[in-house]
Amino acid sequence: MTRKASAEACANIALIKYWGKRDAERHLPCNGSISLALADLRTVTTVAIDPSLTADTLALDGHPASAAELGRLGKVLRPLRERAGETACVRVESVNYFPTAAGLASSAAGFAALALAAAAAYDLTLDEPELSRLARIGSGSACRSVPGGWAEWHAGTDPAGLDSFATRLAPPDHWDLRVMVGLVATGPKAVGSGAGMAGTVATSPFYAGWLQGVAEDLPVARAAILARDFDTLGEAAERSCLRMHGSMLGAVPPLLYWQPATIAVMQAVWQWRQEGLPCFFTIDAGPNVKVFCPAAVAADVERRMKFIPGVTGVRASGPGQGVALSKAHLF
Ligand code: 2P0
């Protein structure tokens, strides 16, 4: 008999960024980070335990996964199998409802959904910190998609990562901000974030400054979210983004994810703020720019972004929920 479960999770956008690992195998970060889950950038993952299989299978948006992706799947499944006393293989399908591998953190939603769906398929009940740690083993930022809403990933100090998981700072309806994902490129990027982080930690003289700045920005952003202080949060988020990218520029070889259109959006956002439009940007390990603003001005920001040359699309999203089981199986 095949046991099957599906789960749905949202991507998340880091406002205070995660950049650099103290343990690459376990995805243990050098610094804490703070994020907002995005309701409209979702992944659905179905896991079926199938004793007739001789190896795990994984399909991403209908395509067979690479060996590296299967390796990450195995890392997440291993602790669940040990705990459940199971050896049977699984068939996994995951569908993203947004462009993958373009700095939109599709792996975050995917591994959060995988952790819950796989635990449910193996008939295990994990509490939220356990699920968050499990999702982190697949992809670091995935741990923040488990609680969803406004979330903080605690870097932790435990070598095994027991204290490195995300908790919810506030529910999605705490503050009705909008995030506009400005699409600059949708193809896969040349340097993945894992390699980018490793190069920055190992070679950038700016990395120590990055860590010092993030330690100062975390309490500022946390308090600004709780107080719904938009300008303070926005300033901290832009600072975090720019310092993260600055640390990459100091790496050997240097790492630059921006395209001309990335910079055009950044400069437009600064101009719009001067004109009185409340909005800030943030950029992950890719060329796309996310602009966030209060819901009341979202339509104006979206319209303006679409006019910027090189921006090929804008995907608007409000705050999203944490990971949840879904009755809609993919197969
Ligand atoms: C973040 N990024 O905080 C940062 C900002 C990109 C820039 O987390 O190697 O896919 O799986 O731990 O989580 C993207 O990196 O990396 C990321 P792994 P992940 O969202």
Image: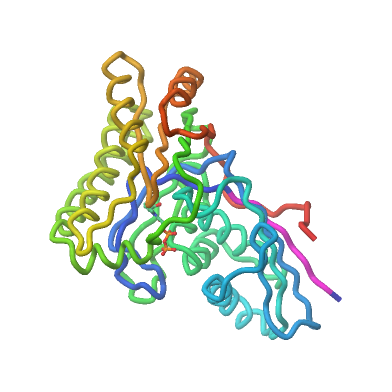
Image point (15%, 54%), residue name: 209
Name the one closer to the observer, 269 or 324.
269
Quarter of the render that holds ligand 1: bottom left
By secondary structure, the bulk of the magenta-drawn segment is best described as: strand
Does the magenta segment cover residue 4? yes
Point out residue 123 in the picture as x, y percentages from the top left corner: 72, 70
Does the magenta segment cover residue 154? no
Image point (54%, 58%), residue name: 128
Residue projecting furthest to the right: 1
46 horizontally vs 234: left or right? right
Give the quadrant of residue 4.
bottom right
Quarter of the figure with the N terminus = bottom right
Point out residue 273 in the picture as x, y percentages from the top left corner: 30, 20
Region of the chain picked out in magenta, as a range:
2-9
Q: Is residue 51 above or below residue 227?
A: below
Point out residue 319 in the picture as x, y percentages from the top left corner: 52, 36
Name the one closer to the observer, 235 or 197.
197
Image point (48%, 58%), residue name: 143
Quarter of the figure with the C terminus = bottom right
- What's the image's color scheme? rainbow
Q: Is residue 241 above or below residue 312?
A: below
Point out residue 14 in the picture as x, y percentages from the top left corner: 39, 46
Residue projecting furthest to the top: 275
Number of numbered discs: 0
